[in-house]
Image (spheres, rainbow, N blue to C red):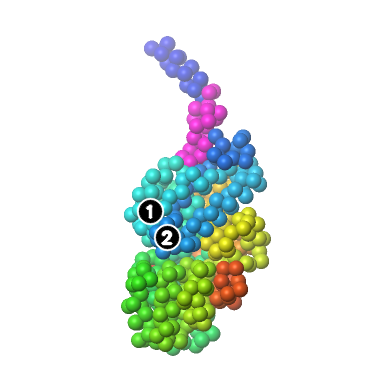
């Protein structure tokens, strides 16, 4: 019996010395260190001596209402990480691949879940998961497997999820600031919210409701489906009720239908659309004149042409592309993941658990000026950590993406005083 024990001990020593597995690390065998991390270099490695961290992307790349933004979002993230790799990678040990595991969700929650399941075992985390209802479809699995994901969305629900690495103020805070801005600027007596069903639209509509009530302004919520030909109900509500200000939370094509057709029917009130309602192509669309006259964009961050080191780095890295603020968002969203990966590698726990721990320890992120550093606070409770500053942009035909900032980062009195004790959309 002792003979077999001795043989077993020798085998264990041999396996250990050959570098099979020690904790989260694997030696020179070339196999995976952990899910989504290998000792082997990335497919497009700058330095063949570095290992590879794989991050997945699930986005609206073809058929959904946000494809016009999602394609440049995804491209910007690819270029962002190429820049990181050129500068030495993460912690001097790893480069990052965000190109191998890219999937199309068509802005459909079931499709999102399906394609996520195809890649989840091959990635450390998600560089992008586009959409609020779509990301909600995989949230339980993200939490069960400690998979950190950067969302291409801003629902306030993300403030309550450790695995979600959000950037910028949530839709409900953005809408609160938009209403406070409207009250200050236009002195409205009635405000309407026109919004998609689900976490995206309802979160903004709830914020608008909270701010309208805080300001003593009449409020009405009108839910509308996706589809430019399906906006008749919303347009009828606007032209019949004649609110002074309409807060819109839809996709760009639906925004154009709502604003253009309402204006054609004689409506002269103001529209303020949340960030994802705008796309540069709208300025040259048939609705362009109505949008120029009646629309402003609330936004979580500054547009393409802004003068910050991050914006300049983005423009230089992308080169000759048609400006689109999808690029701006995709680039800005990547900074927190970079900060978390660097902290993970420095801490030595190269794993999903190590990345999640790194995220939960971040109190600031260097966005190179694209967002204030405090927008990257993931360590506090939701009410103290939530970022409350947003901007207002106006349509500007001469601007690279059709909008320029008219009111820089600010927090209105409603958002300043609001206690975030749960996702806003539950209060609509």
Residue at figure coordinates x 42%, y 45% from the top left: 120
x and y percentages locating residue 374 in the rendered image: 58, 63
In the rendered structure, does residue 116 fall within the stretch colored magenta? no
Which residue bears the numbered disc 1?
Answer: 112
x and y percentages locating residue 421 in the rendered image: 42, 67
Q: What is the quadrant of the C terminus in the image?
A: bottom left
Q: What is the quadrant of the N terminus in the image?
A: top left
> Magenta stretch?
17-39
Depth check: 260 or 95 in front? Answer: 260
Residue at figure coordinates x 48%, y 17% from the top left: 10
x and y percentages locating residue 243 in the rendered image: 41, 85
Depth check: 199 or 75 in front? Answer: 75
Q: Residues within 10 Å of mark 1 (few under 14, many from 20)?
A: many
Predominant secondary structure, magenta span: loop
**Is residue 183 visible from the viewing direction of this image?**
yes
Count of numbered tags: 2
In the rendered structure, does residue 35 fall within the stretch colored magenta? yes
Between the C-alphas of marks 2 and 1, the distance is 9 Å
**Is residue 415 visible from the viewing direction of this image?**
no
Disc 2 vs disc 1: Cβ atoms closer than 8 Å? Answer: yes
Which residue bears the numbered disc 2?
Answer: 131
Q: Residues within 10 Å of mark 2 (few under 14, many from 20)?
A: many
SS for dot 2: loop
SS for dot 1: helix
Residue at figure coordinates x 48%, y 73% from the top left: 285
Residue at figure coordinates x 38%, y 82% from the top left: 238
x and y percentages locating residue 311 in the rendered image: 63, 61
- Image-based side of 7 in relation to 374, left or right: left
Q: Earlier in the sequence, mark 2 or mark 1?
A: 1
């Amino acid at each position: 019996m002792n003979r077999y024990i001795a043989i077993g001990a020798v085998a264990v020593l041999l396996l250990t010395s050959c570098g099979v597995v020690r904790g989260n690390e694997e030696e020179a065998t070339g196999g995976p260190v952990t899910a989504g991390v290998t000792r082997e270099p990335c497919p497009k490695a700058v330095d063949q001596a570095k290992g590879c961290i794989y991050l997945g992307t699930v986005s609206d790349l073809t058929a959904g209402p946000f494809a016009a933004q999602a394609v440049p979002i995804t491209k910007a993230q690819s270029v962002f990480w190429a820049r990181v790799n050129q500068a030495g990678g993460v912690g001097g040990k790893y480069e990052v691949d965000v190109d191998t595991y890219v999937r199309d969700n068509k802005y459909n929650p079931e499709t999102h879940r399906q394609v996520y399941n195809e890649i989840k075992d091959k990635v450390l985390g998600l560089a992008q998961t586009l959409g609020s209802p779509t990301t909600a479809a995989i949230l339980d699995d993200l939490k069960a497997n400690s998979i950190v994901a950067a969302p291409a969305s801003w629902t306030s629900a993300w403030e309550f999820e450790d695995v979600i690495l959000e950037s910028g103020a949530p839709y409900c805070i953005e809408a609160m600031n938009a209403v406070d801005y409207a009250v200050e600027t236009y002195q409205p007596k009635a405000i309407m919210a026109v919004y998609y069903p689900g976490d995206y639209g309802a979160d903004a509509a709830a914020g608008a409701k909270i701010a309208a009530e805080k300001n003593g302004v009449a409020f009405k919520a009108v839910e509308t489906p996706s589809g430019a030909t399906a906006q008749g109900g919303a347009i009828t509500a606007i032209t019949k009720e004649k609110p002074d200000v309409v807060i819109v939370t839809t996709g760009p094509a639906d925004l154009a239908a709502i604003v253009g057709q309402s204006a054609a029917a004689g409506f002269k009130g103001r529209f303020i659309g949340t960030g994802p309602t705008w796309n540069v192509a709208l300025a040259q669309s048939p609705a362009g004149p109505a949008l120029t006259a009646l629309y402003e964009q609330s936004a979580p961050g500054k547009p393409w042409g802004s003068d910050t080191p991050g914006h300049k780095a983005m423009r230089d890295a992308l080169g000759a592309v048609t400006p689109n603020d999808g690029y701006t968002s995709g680039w800005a969203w990547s900074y927190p993941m970079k900060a978390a990966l660097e902290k993970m590698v420095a801490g030595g726990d190269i794993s999903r658990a190590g990345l999640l721990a790194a995220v939960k320890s971040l109190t600031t992120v260097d966005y190179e000026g694209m967002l204030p550093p405090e927008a990257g606070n993931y360590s506090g409770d939701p009410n103290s950590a939530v970022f409350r500053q947003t901007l207002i942009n106006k349509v500007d035909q001469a601007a690279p993406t059709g909008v320029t900032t008219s009111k820089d980062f600010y927090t209105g009195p409603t958002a300043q005083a609001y206690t975030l004790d749960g996702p806003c959309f539950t209060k609509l």
